[in-house]
């Protein structure tokens, strides 16, 4: 648990480094622009199409004429904002995992683990597999969570979805350049509770206003710090055991 909080605190400190600023900004900007464009061209037409096929029943007329329409409009607006923010954060996470991780790994490795050898046990296909599978599960969980948001359980499901996305997206990539294939296999199969714990901690950031803007880079940095420290410890232990034999 100490190592988890250490990795998180180091990641938070790294956010204030000038070299991280651009890495922090551009995935968020790209994701926001993407969903604004998608919303502009697809959201409104789809809503209008749905409204056209809904029959104007007596019940719908009654709702329109009552104050309930104000409540439902308010709930709809809140959900729209929540969904938009989470789509932007999720897309930023994916962009960070696919395109930003090498730069962040170099940043952390050179400053904190300069003697840690790179054995390049990971692969692009391995990274893509983790990204795609994590995204599918995350979307599925969020689809289940949204109808239950206003009774509490939806928030819990969303939180677990964020934790899953984080540890699945970044657990592999964080050590894919430094670990060998065998090391990668062993480390990903062990200490899963710690990976989930870090996923939960970084997932919490996604639900804190303003802080969630830093969530993609902060999460990536935290997993890099945690996984490289774990790899260094694993190699030291393996070396010690070999020398004793």
Image (cartoon, helix red, strand yellow):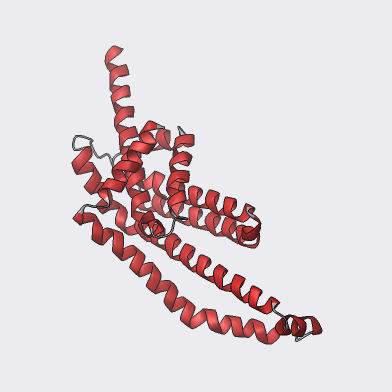
234 horizontally vs 69: left or right: left
Q: Quadrant of the C terminus?
A: top left
Residue in the foreground of this view, choosing between 233 and 160: 160
151 horizontally vs 202: left or right: right
Q: Quadrant of the N terminus?
A: top left
At x 31%, y 34%, the residue is: 229
Q: Position of residue 136 (x, y in %)?
A: 53, 57
Q: Which residue occupies the extreme right position in the image? A: 58
Residue in the foreground of this view, choosing between 181 and 105: 105
107 horizontally vs 52: left or right: left
- Quarter of the image where one finds residue 112: top left
Q: Which residue occupies the extreme top position in the image? A: 245
Compared with 63, 155 (above or below) is above
Compared with 140, 66 (above or below) is below
At x 29%, y 12%, the residue is: 244
Residue in the foreground of this view, choosing between 128 and 90: 90
- Quarter of the image where one finds residue 47: bottom right
Q: Position of residue 105 (x, y in %)?
A: 27, 47
At x 53%, y 56%, the residue is: 138
At x 32%, y 44%, the residue is: 224
Q: Position of residue 240 (x, y in %)?
A: 29, 18
- Quarter of the image where one finds residue 61: bottom right
Residue in the foreground of this view, choosing between 144 and 97: 144
Compared with 41, 92 (above or below) is above
Compared with 41, 189 (above or below) is above
């Amino acid at each position: 648990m100490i190592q988890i909080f250490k990795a998180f605190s180091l990641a938070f400190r790294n956010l204030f480094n000038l070299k991280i600023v651009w890495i922090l900004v551009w995935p968020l900007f790209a994701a926001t622009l993407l969903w604004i464009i998608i919303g502009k061209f697809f959201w409104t037409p789809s809503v209008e199409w749905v409204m056209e096929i809904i029959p104007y029943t007596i019940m719908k007329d009654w709702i329109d004429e009552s104050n309930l329409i104000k409540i439902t409009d308010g709930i709809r607006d809140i959900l729209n904002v929540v969904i938009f923010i989470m789509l932007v954060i999720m897309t930023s996470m994916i962009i960070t995992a696919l395109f930003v991780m090498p730069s962040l790994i170099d940043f952390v490795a050179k400053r904190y683990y300069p003697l840690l050898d790179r054995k390049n046990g990971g692969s692009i296909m391995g990274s893509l597999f983790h990204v795609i599978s994590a995204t599918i599960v995350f979307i599925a969980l969020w689809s289940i969570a949204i109808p239950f948001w206003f009774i509490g359980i939806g928030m819990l499901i969303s939180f677990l979805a964020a934790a899953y996305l984080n540890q699945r997206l970044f657990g592999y990539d964080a050590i894919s350049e430094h670990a060998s294939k065998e090391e990668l296999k062993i480390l990903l199969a062990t200490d899963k509770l710690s990976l989930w714990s870090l996923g939960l901690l970084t997932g919490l950031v996604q639900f804190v206003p303003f802080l969630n803007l830093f969530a993609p880079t902060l999460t990536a940095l935290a997993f890099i710090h945690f996984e490289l420290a774990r790899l260094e410890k694993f190699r030291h232990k393996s070396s010690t055991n070999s020398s004793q034999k």
